[in-house]
Amino acid sequence: MAAETIHATAVAQGGRALLLLGPAGSGKSDLALRLVAAGWQLVADDRVVLARDGDRLIASAPARLAGLIEVRGVGIVPQATHPAMVALALDLARAPDRLPAPDWLGLAGVAVPVLGFDPFGASAVERAARALANHGLDGSSLPVQPILIVTGLSGAGKSTVLKALEDAGHEVVDNLPIGLLDGLLAAAAPRPIALGLDSRTRAFDAKALAARVLALRDAGRDVRLVYLDCADDVLIRRFSETRRRHPLALDRPAIDGIKAERDLLGQLTRSADVVIDSTDLSVTDLRARVTERFGGGFSPGLTVTMLSFGFSAGLPREADLVFDMRFLANPHWDATLRPLTGEDAAVAAFVEADPLYAGTLARIDDLIQSLLPGYAQEGKSYLTIAIGCTGGRHRSVAVARALTARLAAAGQSVALVHRDIAKQAGDAAVVAGAPLTDSGKAGEASNR
């Protein structure tokens, strides 16, 4: 599925999208806001990802802009976004004809009808609806409804994930018996749907769920299986802190239920499209991770997450590729840079000044760029690239930012996540050795 990103705004009615074209200030966001107020759905504001799917053109929001719209005089505000098939383009910079015959515009290899359109005036919303009805492409070949199945260990954050997905515009159903799945999908609205299925579900069978996912895919449904994992000791602590009982250990220690559930769900870890390990994630971090990946529904193509981390806190379990930056000069040992992070210009400049930096960055960038087409061709939807240093605050952050900028400039959808940037500056010193100070006590500490 070939994709390109253009400067535009898109809104949809009945699953068909209007693509609003024009330069900055031409009224795209203002018209989109009025259409949304009239009951239309926002597809994307300011930037639109266009992907060819056969003879259709699917519009969606880039990961960074999903769930947002610009309201002039107010700012950037939340607004759920949903992918849709492009049926018509309106050129707001072109004077409209009184009795128009649409021209045709080639986008991502698909021909789309385009009209000149005046976005101002009280009748703009009604005129846009009439334009879509009279000149828009037939919606009989609408994209299939995306289905997201969320499962995993109890206590790993499934409820948090489902709430985040609901806030992002998904239709969410939790704890649905598998026998009712077909009926729900047949009656569901044409928007992304998220289903919570786990060991609490009546007559839950991991093998049957995996088989059902395969059957849905064979039937042409766009279905993804997301598995939530977490370390045993963290799960035990969470059950203790919340005073909840594990659903598989109502009268036994929580660890017994955790072990039983791992055995029960083992097959699903192998069938999952995405595994999210919530061991080191707060509720806020988990919500952010989910919103970054699924906030705009299902963006076409391969979605890349660039993740900075500290080896002192352990390797990220979700990483597909790991690069170690501990050979670069460490800003931690500069007393003026230690309180800062790789997001600060001074730290980034320090890291970039290392003679090994430029060549390393170029080689890693070349390697990633050469691998991405292969991952996409094999059907991989998500790729996590982990960049590590000792504490996860300086070198890894700076390098991850630089690589993210390079990938984005090359047209790749990429989300930047800093796992350990919020940790105290002193945490890295515990691993790296006693911190350098101006008090002359560093030598004394190192000899203790």
Image: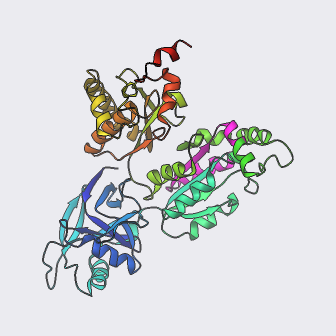
Left or right: residue 430 versus residue 73 is right
Which residue occupies the extreme bottom position in the image? Answer: 122
What's the residue at 30%, 24% (across, down)? 360
> Was residue 107 drawn as part of the magenta stretch in this picture?
no
Q: Nearer the viewer, residue 78 or 340?
A: 340
118 w.r.t. 339: above or below: below
**On the rendered image, what quadrant is the C terminus found in?**
top right
Return the x and y of residue 84 as percentages of the image width and height.
38, 65
Which residue occupies the extreme right position in the image? Answer: 251
Which quarter of the figure has residue 232? Answer: top right
Which residue occupies the extreme front position in the image? Answer: 439
Residue 380 visible in the shown view: no
48 w.r.t. 276: above or below: below
Q: Nearer the viewer, residue 245 or 44?
A: 245
50 w.r.t. 269: above or below: below
> Was residue 215 drawn as part of the magenta stretch in this picture?
yes
> By what rule are the colours in the image chosen?
rainbow
Which residue occupies the extreme top position in the image? Answer: 447
Magenta residues span 207-236
254 w.r.t. 116: above or below: above
Q: Nearer the viewer, residue 267 or 134?
A: 267
Return the x and y of residue 83 as percentages of the image width and height.
40, 62
What's the residue at 29%, 39% (across, down)? 345
What's the residue at 49%, 65% (across, down)? 169
Return the x and y of residue 445 as percentages of the image width and height.
52, 17
Residue 251 visible in the shown view: yes
Return the x and y of residue 114 as percentages of the image width and height.
21, 71
